[in-house]
Amino acid sequence: MNNWNFYARLTTGEVVRFAEATITGSWVTLKSVELLNSSESVVLEHEDPLMWGRGMVVQVDHIVWCADEDS
């Protein structure tokens, strides 16, 4: 675990901040997720990060870019 924040933009328009990620096959679990913005046409069922429990799971190919807070 580190003290950095990471950011990712998804193909659906959301930008998320997360603290950690694990990859399993073609899926990524983003942990300690905070939704920073979203496309108005996209409605997430659980936009409150507390509702995501163990993390937000997305397909690897649905991530447009990633960056750390120092990039």
Image (spheres, rainbow, N blue to C red):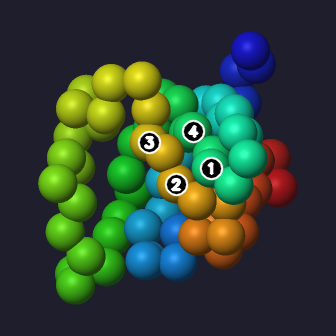
Q: Is residue 41 above or below residue 6?
A: below
Which image quadrant for residue 14?
Answer: bottom left
**Secondary element at tag 4:** strand
Among all residues in the image, which is located at the extreme front? 25
Q: According to the image, label 2 marks what residue?
A: 58
Mark 1 is surrounded, within 10 Å at the Cα level, by few (under 14), some (14 to 19) or many (20 or more) other residues, namely some
Quadrant hosting residue 38: bottom left
The numbered disc on residue 64 is: none
Q: Residue shown at 22%/84% (left/top)?
A: 41
Q: Amino acid at mark 3?
A: Met
Q: Which residue is mark 4?
A: 29
Q: Are marks 2 and 4 in contact (CB under 8 Å)?
A: no
Of label 1 and label 2, which has the lower sequence position? 1
Asked if marks 2 and 3 touch (Cβ < 8 Å), the reply is yes
Seen at 31% across and 79% down, the residue is 39
Check if mark 1's residue and mark 2's residue have beta carbons within 8 Å. Answer: yes
- Compared to 62, does 22 lie above or below? above
Tell which circle, 2 or 4, labels the residue nearer the N-terminal end. Answer: 4
> Which residue has dot 1 on it?
27
Q: Secondary structure at mark 3?
A: strand
